[in-house]
Amino acid sequence: MPRPRKCRKICCLPKTKGFNPIACERLKSPVSLTVDEYEAIRLIDKEGLSQEECSLKMEVARTTVQQIYTQARQKIAEALVDERPLRISGGDYRLCDGNPHTNGCACCKHKKVKCEQETE
């Protein structure tokens, strides 16, 4: 029996739920990026954190972050190269409580919530 998936801690939800290609001649099926994959991309590529630092923020193992990050990059590449819409939703995550003493982000003011555990 596999081990249950651990919720990934995220700082905040994405500001948008997706992106569409500008010149899309026909409607193509969207690529689905989970919220935890979005967070890994945000922390590593935008914030410039290492995978180790990202794993501490998301409260998961570095190898888990590496898997999440690899999957996210593959999905983004697929959406860009194949001119497909990108949707951001689902995943196993919980919002940061904003308390720096509990490994929370000092910059956010979110209240702790239970794991969303959305799967598609």
Image: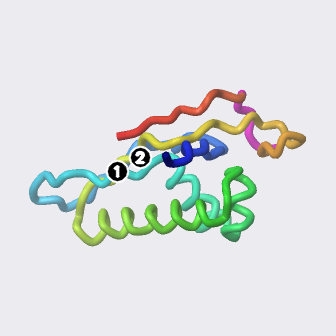
Disc 1 is placed on an element classified as strand
Mark 1 touching mark 2, by CB under 8 A? yes
Q: Is residue 90 left or right of residue 101?
A: left
Q: Residue at x 52, y 44 (%)?
A: 14
Numbered marks: total: 2
Q: Residue at x 35, y 40 (%)?
A: 120
| Nearest to the observer: residue 70 or residue 63 | 63
Q: Which residue is mark 1?
A: 32
In this picture, is 18 found above or below 70?
above
Q: Position of residue 58 (x, y in %)?
A: 67, 51
- Give the colour scheme of this rendering: rainbow
Looking at numbered disc 1 in the image, what kind of residue is underneath it?
Ser
The label on residue 88 is 2
Disc 2 is placed on an element classified as strand
Looking at numbered disc 2 in the image, what kind of residue is underneath it?
Ile
Q: Position of residue 9 (x, y in %)?
A: 65, 44
Q: Which residues are magenta?
A: 106-111
The mark nearer the N terminus, 1 or 2, is 1
Q: Position of residue 57 (x, y in %)?
A: 72, 53
| Nearest to the observer: residue 33 or residue 85 | 33
Q: Residue at x 64, y 60 (%)?
A: 43
Q: Is residue 100 left or right of residue 74?
A: right
Q: Position of residue 62 (x, y in %)?
A: 66, 64
Q: CA distance from mark 1 to mark 2?
A: 6 Å
Main secondary structure along the magenta-highlighted residues: loop
In this picture, is 13 found above or below 27?
above
Q: Residues within 10 Å of mark 2 (few under 14, many from 20)?
A: many
Q: Residues within 10 Å of mark 1 (few under 14, many from 20)?
A: some
